[in-house]
Image: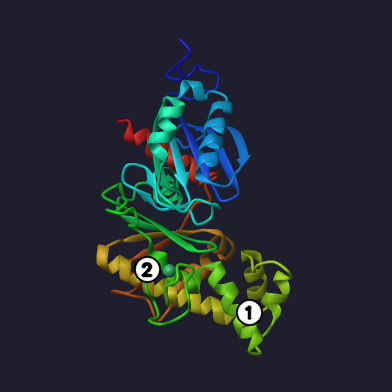
Amino acid sequence: VASGREAGNGVGIQDPVVGVDLGGTKILARLVDPQTGRAVGRIKANTPSGPAAVLEAIVDVVNELEGSDGASTVGVGVPGLVRPGGVVDRCPNIAGWDSPVSVKAELSSRLGKSVVVSNDVNCGAVAEHRVGAAKGIANFLAVFVGTGVGGGLVLNNELVEGGRGMAGEIGHVTVSPGGRLCNCGGKGHLEAYAGRAGIDAEARRRVEAGASPLLVELAGDGKIKSRHIERGLKDRDSLTSELLAEAADALAQGLGNVACLLDLEHIVIGGGVVDKLGQGFVDQINDSDSFGGVGSEMVKIILAHRIDDAGVVGAAILAADDGH
Ligand SMILES: [Zn+2]
């Protein structure tokens, strides 16, 4: 019988699960061992516009993936708000996806497999929990600082999604009432201070007003990247230091408050900006006068592991859990 239930299926994984990471530019599918997080095979496609074409592309990458016929379960991580039941409300990073789509129902009927759909940041949190920095930790918030700031909450060893799929979304807690404009249209949100897009916008505003232009010059025609921030820090650029201090203060305030509210002993922090700046940035957060709640002595902030294809691995683990 051609079944993935035997380790002799050619891919060496018992009970493999297909993990899919739907990104704004690429779709990636791999065959995952949900016990260890090991992934084999790799099929990539460009993300097309509009949900109908995206669903078709996901079906194609899964079918092309060697060994996927031996997997009965597929986990899909998506860059948008996932409502209970696998309905994806909207994906701001995917052109033409601005109304709800039943991704779970559509994909399971086309693939003939059981499908679990989750937010991509939540998938990253689950990957950290099971095969990364939070292994063995029952209660934590995972925070990923990249273009924006995303978060995933695990309590009692379970991912908490919330009634509307928004639990753990620390990027949109307010750290400065009436402050910087956030990508979501709100004001003073954490993401506007710690996310790369927020740092980029504020850097340009201050350079216009006469601040040190190094960061903006390093970025050239493009956006300010994590490596530019790292370089600005190394060169002791005054604007870089100011913006990073403000990012650390905002994170300290937000993370401290969440740790206090939920009695968290651990917070896992990762993402492009943190990966580049490392422990020095974590120390800066810990030392901030703005640390919220009961202070940094009560919560340990630990660096995320840089798990390869964490979104794919986490989606597969969530899908495997769902089947048990
Ligand atoms: Zn916001």
Residue 246's mark? none
**Image quadrant occupied by the N terminus:** top left
Looking at the image, residue 177 sits to the left or right of residue 30; the answer is left
Residue identified by numbered label 2: 255
- Which tag, 1 or 2, sits closer to the chain's start? 1
Q: Can residue 240 be seen at all in this image of the molecule?
A: no
Picture layout, residue 270 above or below residue 239: above
Q: Residue at x 53, y 23 (%)?
A: 67
Q: Position of residue 81 (x, y in %)?
A: 40, 53
Tell me the CA gap for discs 1 and 2.
27 Å
Q: Position of residue 11 (x, y in %)?
A: 54, 23
Q: Position of residue 113 (x, y in %)?
A: 41, 26
Q: Residue at x 51, y 35 (%)?
A: 38
Residue identified by numbered label 1: 204
At label 2, the amino acid type is Leu
Q: Residue at x 55, y 19 (%)?
A: 10
At label 1, the amino acid type is Arg
Q: Position of residue 243 (x, y in %)?
A: 55, 78
Q: Name the image quarter holding residue 105.
A: top left
Please rate how many residues cluster around mark 1, counting C-alpha atoms within 10 Å: few if below 14, some from 14 to 19, many from 20. Answer: some
Looking at the image, residue 320 sits to the left or right of residue 191; the answer is left
**Quadrant field for ligand 1:** bottom left
Identify which residue, 187 or 272, lies in the foreground.
Answer: 187
Is disc 1 placed on a helix, strand or loop?
helix
Please rate how many residues cluster around mark 2, counting C-alpha atoms within 10 Å: few if below 14, some from 14 to 19, many from 20. Answer: many
Number of numbered discs overlaid on the protein picture: 2
Frontmost of labels 1 and 2 is 1
Picture layout, residue 33 above or below residue 103: above
